Image (cartoon, rainbow, N blue to C red):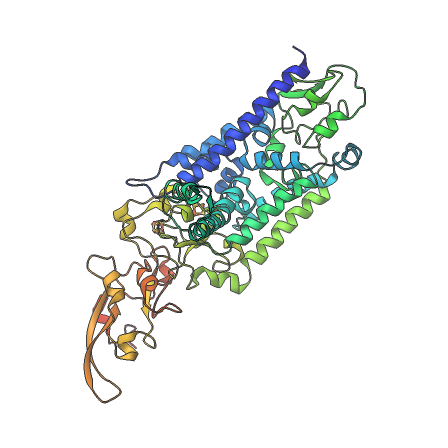
Amino acid sequence: MTARGRARRLIWLRRGVQAASLALFVGLLLAMRPPESGAPSPRLGFYFHLDPLLLVGAWLGGERLAGPALLALATLALTVLLGRVFCGWLCPLGALHNALSWLGWRSAARRRETDGLSRWQRAKYWLLVALLVMAVGGAHWTGVFDPQSLLYRSLTTGLLPGLDWGISAGAAAIFQADPQLGPLHLTALSEPLYRFWRDALLAGREFVFAGGGLILALLLALLALNLWRPRFWCRYLCPLGALLGACAGRTALRLTPTGTCGACQRCLLRCPAAAQPEKPGQWLPEECFGCWNCVASCGEDALDFRWQWPWRRPAAARVDLGRRALVGAGLAGLGALLVFKLPPSARAKTFGPELIRPPGALAEGDFLARCVQCGLCMQVCPTGALQPAIDQAGLAGLWTPVLVPRLGYCEHGCALCGQVCPTGAIAPLALAEKQALSIGLATIDTTRCLPYVYGRECIVCEEHCPVPTKAIYFVETEVTLRGGERRVLKQPRVEPTLCTGCGICETKCPFADRAAIRVTSANESRHPANQPLLPGGTESVGSNPYGA
Ligand code: SF4
Ligand code: SF4
């Protein structure tokens, strides 16, 4: 068989692998739901464990590398052997970009002009350098740009809620209008489909994620750029691609001239990576995705991938990253680090009242070092309490999970977020350990609470408090009503040694605008410096605990 014939078969195989990889990624995403019993399978985080950029980020964040995270070393070994086949064959985001690039039609003459190697392809290496410099200094944005995190976050917080809204609204409109085609009611089709979506795929969950629309819009913009340049993200921006490119410089499988080039440049037109297959001896292994398009497109059978010993230098000049540009990228990373870390406002965020982290979250600095903003914890939280942070944690904590008690609460019998977190940013705690932790403290607003100011009975917060011995208790107080009538009312108080800060009291408070009981991050177990209550329990109430 000719090299061209073999390449054509391999391309069909690659397309199958890409489709299967994308389907597996989406399948794992849909499977990431609160299980009927027990914990979700750790295999659901498979793509995150495969990802060397996240491994490097976690390592720079001080994590001991062990267990499934070491799968990423297999990706690196594969890259050293075969080049960037992860980008070309396995990456789910890469598969999406590939499909979109195929849709973007432009004339051959135009593509000849624009689709060759561009010096801007070095930008992804500069971005990688800046991100690593930031990570060394403790400001971690690898997750913001990592393709697995980016895709997972966008699908979870943007696409699924958007689809859910569209499908629910569509099904409701069809149900109300009840259109008919002859004797057939359209609802006979729409209702089973809607129930399948709601019960089997979403498993009854309802999503609301703050800023999900913007996260999705960013993904859609990146996908749209493929219509301008094939695989725009992979060529110019992807820091994982840059990391793999840095390991692929001496790959064992190399594009080799095997005949006389007719200079037709068909390989250039088909190369999504602009790896210079059209220049014999100038092919760039750091850029090549191993897609085999060039071999399949060559009418002269003048190209083929051949094995070579890794210690033999490739004939091609390597991508010149530019020493000055690299230093500039490092300085840009340093500048971002200063902006993220230095301003007093950024440091004040550590104990921000709204910075309520999931139970088991590490102390803020360590948490930010490990969290890759993937959103797995948000996806699995049964009450929808975990939301992508916008400004609660400062720039350094963009899209990291925070608990928003107005939207949901931490379920007393659940410790899922720690069990699914692929990086250990949230420790995997047993349920009893999690229940012994505090993530915040409830505070009663006595200017709003019904029994305090309006002379009405209300025991909603106490009723919902899940702590067996109740962290909310009542003090009976005689109050005088408007007409002079005197009434004994039960006024709620919070016992700080029992309150876990789960937030259910705030979620359920009858005030829909601003709850009369609110949870802040005070007293969180992870930060001794954020625990204002001195030991001594209830004895200190009513006296000055500072003894002045
Ligand atoms: S432990 Fe709490 S915050 Fe974490 S997933 Fe469960 S309910 Fe959500
Ligand atoms: S804390 Fe949540 S968003 Fe961050 S890495 Fe863990 S699972 Fe992903």
**369 on left or right of 101:** left
Residue 204, image x, y percentages: 36, 47
Above or below: residue 515 compared with residue 265: below
Q: How many marks?
A: 0
Query: Which is nearer the eye, 133 or 223?
Result: 223
Extreme-front residue of the structure: 182
147 versus 78 height, above or below? below
**On-image quarter of the N terminus:** top right
Residue 445 sits in which quadrant?
Answer: bottom left
Give the camera-side residue of 113 and 46.
113
Q: Is 132 situated left or right of 69 in this image? A: right
Counting from the top left corner in percent of width and height, residue 235 is at 66, 37
Q: Who is closer to the viewer here, 419 or 40?
A: 40
Q: Is residue 490 visible?
A: yes
As displayed, is residue 2 above or below residue 477? above
Where is 547 relative to 247, above or below? below
Q: Is residue 307 visible?
A: no
Residue 324 falls left or right of residue 345 = right
* Quadrant housing the C terminus: bottom left
Residue 224 sits in quarter: top right
Q: Residue at x 52, y 54 (%)?
A: 396
Q: Residue 458 at x, y = what percent?
A: 25, 71
